[in-house]
Each structure stands twice: as structure tokens, then as C-alpha cells.
Image: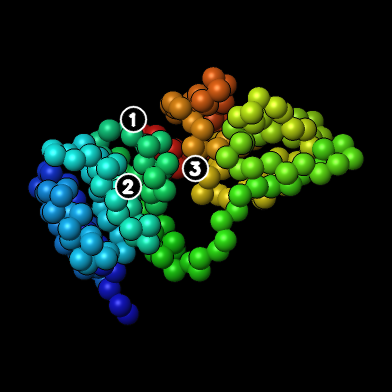
């Protein structure tokens, strides 16, 4: 089986040592490391890695800036001690966000996500969903959705345009129409667009329209993983 080509970019050598040990433990990974983000970009252009493990706060260049310049065919996994950058990382389409110090099992999960993305066949990007509102069909752009709330017998779709679309679909059925890399269910009554999340804790998420969304106990593990909450 062809090994997975990886680059780790972190200006702290001990962090690179941890990633090196974890990659060796997993097997099937060819790892190149550097403490210099500029050199990391040069390596990425030459090696064309499958995965880049990338710190965010580094001397000389932010990991976010590095990620923005790396090929979209490369899976980026952020590795950082700073929780505040989680949303920025996911906005750059990162596969995962590892909050230092992370365990080997969490590292395995992140690499597993990257493998699945690498093996997935590319599909046309979904841009909207269409729902029934009363007796007509309404097309809603995905980037116009802030969150969806379950009401008795229907769902309310709250939109950045300020409008609210009400449909006689259950929250589960609306959720099935949405791409999981953008939308996440965080409560039995709420699905959020994670790119519209502004601040969050283990108990709640504050959306960019000011709405406070609770995190349900049943969905806490998923929300913690996706949003990078420790």
C-alpha cells in the first residue's frame, strides 16, 4: 500500500517529536518535519503531501496564512494550544483541529478523517437546499443559513438575511439535506452552521447573529470534537 505523505510544521521541536512518534506508531506514513513555516510551504509545493499537520502561532508566519496557501488537495490538520482559532481553522476547510496536548487516540481520529477525505470521490459542491413552505417550494442558499430550530411538527430555518423560513419537515429530515462538513447538530432542537459560530464553551454556542444555542448532553461529544472545545 502506498504510504501517506505528510508534513508537520511547528516551531516547537517537542511538538514535532510527538507527531513523529504518533506517525511511527500508526505506520504507513512518510513524515517530513520543519520548524520554519516558509520552508514548510516550499516542502509542500515540492512533496505535494496528502496531509499537513500545522501549528497556528509560529514565528514569521501564522499557520492560518500557511494553510491558505497550501493546495486544496492537501488535508490540513491544525495542532495548536490555542482554542480561540478553532473557528478560523474550520473556515479554511481543515479536516480537524487538535488541541495540544492531544492523545494518540485523538491523533488517530484526525488522521482517519483525513484518510476518508483523501479516498472520497469528488462530488459537485452543494450550494442550496429546497424545502416546502406552505404550498410553495423555497430554495435556501447554504451560506444564508445560521441555524435551524425544531418546533412542534415543523422546523424554523433562521437566515443571515434576517428572514425565517418555516417548513413542515422535522429537524432530522432537514439535517439529512445538509452537508455534514458545514452543519452539525448540537442539541435535540438545534442544528448550526459551524461557520456562523462566533464563540463557544462546553455548554453553549453564540452565533454571529447573537443567538445563544445550548449544547445538549447527547450531542456534546460531537460538538466538542467538531468545534475544538476542550
Q: Label 2: few (<14), some or many (≥20) within 10 Å?
A: few
Task: Point out the tag, 2 or 3, that comes first from the N-terminus.
Answer: 2
Q: Choose mark 3 or mark 1, whichever is in front.
A: 1
CB of mark 2 within 8 Å of CB of mark 3? Answer: no
Residue at 49% of width from left, 31% of height from top?
197
Horizontally, residue 54 falls left or right of residue 84, namely: left
Mark 1 secondary-structure assignment: helix
Vertical order, 114 against 206 (above or below) = below
Task: Identify the residue under disc 1.
Answer: 84
Mark 3 secondary-structure assignment: helix
Given residues 217 and 28, the one toward you in this image is 28
The x, y position of residue 17, in whole percent, is: 13, 53
The disc at residue 15 is none
Residue at 71% of width from left, 28% of height from top?
164
Given residues 93 and 161, the one toward you in this image is 161
Q: Label 3: few (<14), some or many (≥20) within 10 Å?
A: some
Q: Choose mark 1 or mark 2, whichever is in front.
A: 2
Q: How many numbered marks does the figure carry?
A: 3
Question: Which quadrant, please, contains the C terminus?
Answer: top left
The disc at residue 222 is 3
Residue at 60% of width from left, 53% of height from top?
126
Q: CA distance from mark 2 to mark 3?
A: 26 Å
Q: CA distance from mark 3 to mark 1?
A: 18 Å
Mark 2 secondary-structure assignment: helix
Task: Identify the residue under disc 2.
Answer: 68
Furthest residue to the bottom?
Answer: 1
The x, y position of residue 106, in whole percent, is: 34, 50
Residue at 70% of width from left, 27% of height from top?
163
The x, y position of residue 23, in whole percent, is: 23, 61
Q: CA distance from mark 1 to mark 2?
A: 18 Å
Horizontally, residue 101 falls left or right of residue 120, namely: left
Amino acid at each position: 500500500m502506498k504510504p501517506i505523505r505528510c508534513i508537520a510544521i511547528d516551531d516547537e521541536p517537542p511538538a514535532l517529536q510527538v507527531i513523529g512518534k504518533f506517525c511511527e506508531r500508526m505506520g504507513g506514513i512518510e513524515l517530513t518535519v520543519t520548524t520554519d513555516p516558509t520552508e514548510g510551504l516550499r516542502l509542500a509545493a515540492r512533496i505535494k503531501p496528502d496531509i499537513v499537520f500545522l501549528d497556528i502561532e509560529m514565528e514569521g508566519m501564522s499557520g492560518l496564512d500557511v494553510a491558505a496557501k497550501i493546495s486544496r488537495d492537501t488535508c490540513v490538520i491544525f495542532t495548536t494550544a490555542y482554542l480561540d482559532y478553532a473557528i478560523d481553522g474550520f473556515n479554511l476547510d481543515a479536516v480537524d483541529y487538535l488541541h495540544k496536548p492531544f492523545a494518540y487516540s485523538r491523533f488517530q481520529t484526525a488522521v482517519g478523517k483525513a484518510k476518508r477525505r483523501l479516498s472520497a470521490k469528488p462530488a459537485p459542491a452543494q450550494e442550496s437546499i429546497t424545502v416546502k413552505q406552505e404550498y410553495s417550494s423555497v430554495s435556501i442558499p447554504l451560506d444564508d443559513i445560521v441555524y435551524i430550530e425544531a418546533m412542534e411538527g415543523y422546523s424554523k430555518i433562521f437566515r443571515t438575511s434576517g428572514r425565517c423560513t418555516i417548513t413542515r419537515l422535522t429537524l432530522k429530515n432537514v439535517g439529512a439535506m445538509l452537508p455534514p462538513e458545514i452543519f452539525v447538530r448540537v442539541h435535540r432542537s438545534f442544528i448550526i452552521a459551524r461557520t456562523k459560530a462566533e464563540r463557544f464553551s462546553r455548554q453553549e454556542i453564540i452565533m454571529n447573529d447573537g443567538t445563544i444555542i445550548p449544547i445538549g448532553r447527547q450531542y456534546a461529544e460531537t460538538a466538542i470534537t467538531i468545534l475544538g472545545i476542550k
